[in-house]
Image (cartoon, rainbow, N blue to C red):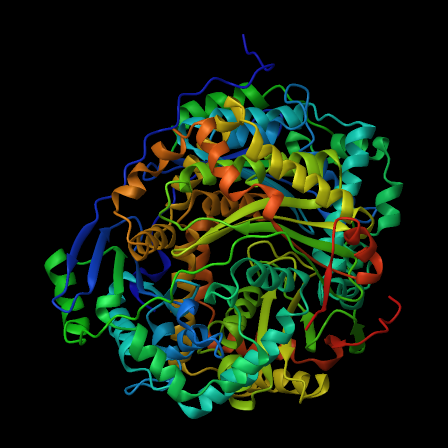
Amino acid sequence: MLDRTKPPETPDLPPFKLPPVFETRLANGLPVLLVEDRRFPLVTARLGFEGGSKLDPANLAGLAESTGALLTEGTARRSAREIAEEVAAIGGALRAGSGPDALLLSGNALAENLPRLLELMADVARNATFPEDEVALRKQNRQQELLAQRSEAAFLAEEKFAQAVYSPHPYSRQEPTPESIDRLDRAALAGFRDRCLVPNNAVLVLLGALPPRDRTLEMIEARFGDWARAEAPAAPPAEFPVPRRTITLVHRPGSVEADIRIGRLGIPRAHPDYFPLLVGNTILGGGASSRLFTNIREKQGFAYDAHSTIQPLKDSGSFAVITEVRNEVARPAIEALLGEMQRMAETDVAAAELATAGNYLSGVFVIRLETQDGLAGQLVATRLLGLPLEYLESYCARVRSVSPQAVRAAAGRSIHPERAAIVVVGDAGQILGQLEALGAVSVEEAQ
Amino acid sequence: MTAAAGALLQIPIEKYALPNGMRVILSPDHSVPVVTVYIAYGVGARAEERGRTGFAHLFEHMMFQGSANAPKGMHFQLVESNGGSLNGSTHPDYTDYFEVLPSNKLAVGLWLESDRMRALAINAENLANQKEAVKQERRLSFDNQPYATAIVDRWPELAFSNWQNSHSLIGSFADLEAASVEDVARFFLTHYAPNNAVLALSGDFRAEEARRLVEEWFGGIPPQPRPPAPDLTEPPRQEPRWELYRDPLARVPAIVIGYPGPARRSPGFYATAVLDILLTGGDSSRFHLHLLKGRQSVIQYEANLGWPFAGPVDYREPGQYAMMLLYNPAFTGEQITAQVEAEIARIRDEGVPEAELERARTYLRSARLHRLESSHSRAMLLGKYELLDQRPELINTELSEYLEAGAAEIQAAAAECCDPAQRTVLNIVPGNNALPT
């Protein structure tokens, strides 16, 4: 007889096995990772370089980002238009992006066009010329894009939070400013390329329906083998401020909500606290069954979304709770968030919460590896962080074996609200009074 | 076109219906231990009644508030504790829900979906709570964002004349407040019946076991009489429409331009989709080369058959081929519109060089393959093709229809777009006095 009253019994999560990864290194120091995936006639490539915006000089925020964007806008061999047309002709995409720790050139193509994809990737990584007219257009459009970004409350909050937590380390400057865009020129861009884009500072990941391994390696050798080794860039000193409580209001006239971020300096990615903190973060605000979602949205009805996040960077990191609430409830919402942070740091999580979080992280991790893009992203990130590939295979076991004591201890170090910075973007006329009830507020105008 | 272009690979499809009318699509694939449960109901915002704007979306929220055997909160908790993710979304013509799960957790997803289809928990407390959540969603996603209110509230009113098509999908606070528990119960009974639903399963499962589970959990849910479909007919347009919208949150001007779109699955449908790729697909597209690069007038753009709420997969007439362009403030909205139309007119008058068309076809092949990679994406395609076309096999055959769109058909599609009488423009500029809407 069918019993509808209880969820059906199902077996434990299936085990995860990473597909075989072949690893080698070219004579110039370029590590190469190959993965066979014949499900689809597609190939996916990543060429990652260590050192993204953290290598930007203090007065040139956005240099890594613009260097990446302009790699595909002209090389010694191809104009921007020729690059764009070749990318389309191979059924692919080719784009470089940058984050705080890395610059990443991402490409894909129909499998039959792998040689042409590799040729293009090598050309843009090695021979970009940063033509004057393309640099000028980039600067003009980036100014407008920045203006558009600054019309979004979430962008302003993100920008201010990074400053509150990381300043003066370069992690505090993850976006450009109008002045830094103005200062960009060919010399700075070429300088960044020469410093960061060298083979011994990179990793090449190639996966999909690849030709036989010898043939694939020959293709890679032909395009990247004579790329000269050079001194790898040194990361800036990993010096970070001691966390302290500050309250900052970015005044955005007309805001109908208060965009709230509360958090503090966390841990570098390779820290032993990483897995306990990851699990703790999931319990607190990682999904739709998390404490924040249940309390702030479902119970109190303060917000559409309430979540927490860790930014685990290579040299440090941050933790934050994030929500956007209607103006009238800014203060009670902040108090509720602080209370939830404190509870994480001072009491043990329940066994059921721990199991849910471990299973959720484990299951979603495997789901994300369903696509070539997902697997390539994990491989390149693991390598750029200097972690062994075994890390990927053991991920599921690790997130499912964290103890309540470990979560509490890690939360005590990274989540406890005592030294957390509070950043709010909203209309000062609507919410300043509520914030002042919590402590001294520094008010800044939205730029 | 290469010989194999139309038949890249075959996605398996088994299609059947339960006696209660629920349509089921099974598509097993054992390469990754993941399974997706996707369910789409044939009711969306265009079926709403006057005074109840935003109701379909409010109801979507109610679907996560618990059911007879899954109390409030259990849906999220059960999916996540079994290693899965989930969501739901409301569209003009349908509303859909999914769970992506580790493969041996299929039964969990089917149990949850069947329990809420059979006996949703509809009560005043859940409704009051979700009205607040939806109001918060409106503040977050629209009222506090540049451009978004103009797009969700004003653009449909300008582009369409029939209220069914032109009212706001997210709805007004007043209409949300007016929704009663009885409204919710009636909507549930009428539209969330098995004979108005398509269930698509894709990924690592055994068809035999899936058939058994589907029969067990969904078989006993009774069908309901189908209400008449809403009349979506648009009166013919005689003159262009243009409106200036001052957006107090915007810092950079943007313009929305749209033209009435073709009938779904007509030759013009495929040709317009290819025309869109020629105009806006990638860095070798005409907008990129001629407007962003050449004239330096446009900064960013997006376009689609069905923009902003649909794409070719779920486009249904009456719809629009529409686009939004963020533009350089040194230009005017009139200039941008003229430049866009000049690009379309050039294709109408001069056709498309074969090399350029071949690039667009390669783009289509590649894009199709990428959409087949994940079980979630495959299940969504199968479910939507069944719901909107009664042809899930389109997942395997549709690509060749796009590849066969020739230069002459694309020129004809461009000519359709170029009729100025049919044009709708919403010019969104930074400013402090939003026009009454």
Image quadrant where residue B121 sits: top right
Give the residue furthest to the top: A1
List x then y, in percent, for residue B284: 44, 78
Query: A21 left or right of A178?
Result: left
Q: Is residue B47 visible to us here? A: no
Query: Is residue B263 in sight in this rendering?
Result: yes
Front-most of A149 and B48? A149
**What residue occupies the far bottom of the structure in this picture?**
A132
In this picture, residue B406 sits left or right of residue B60: left
From this view, report whether residue B45 is shown above or below residue B271: above
Q: Where is residue A120 in the image (x, y as percent from the top left)?
A: 29, 75
Task: Name which residue lies at 79% across and 53% down.
Answer: A436
Residue A378 locus on image (x, y percent): 35, 51
Residue at 44% in and 88% down: A185
The one of B230 and A205 positioned closer to us in this rendering: A205
The answer to whether B406 appears left or right of A179 in the picture is left
> Is B77 left, or right, of A400 in this rendering?
right
- Asked if residue A226 is positioned above or below residue A152 in the image, the reply reads below
Picture quarter with the C terminus of chain B: bottom right
Q: Where B247 falls versus A337 (above or below)?
A: below
- Number of callouts: 0
x 43%, y 35%: residue: A363
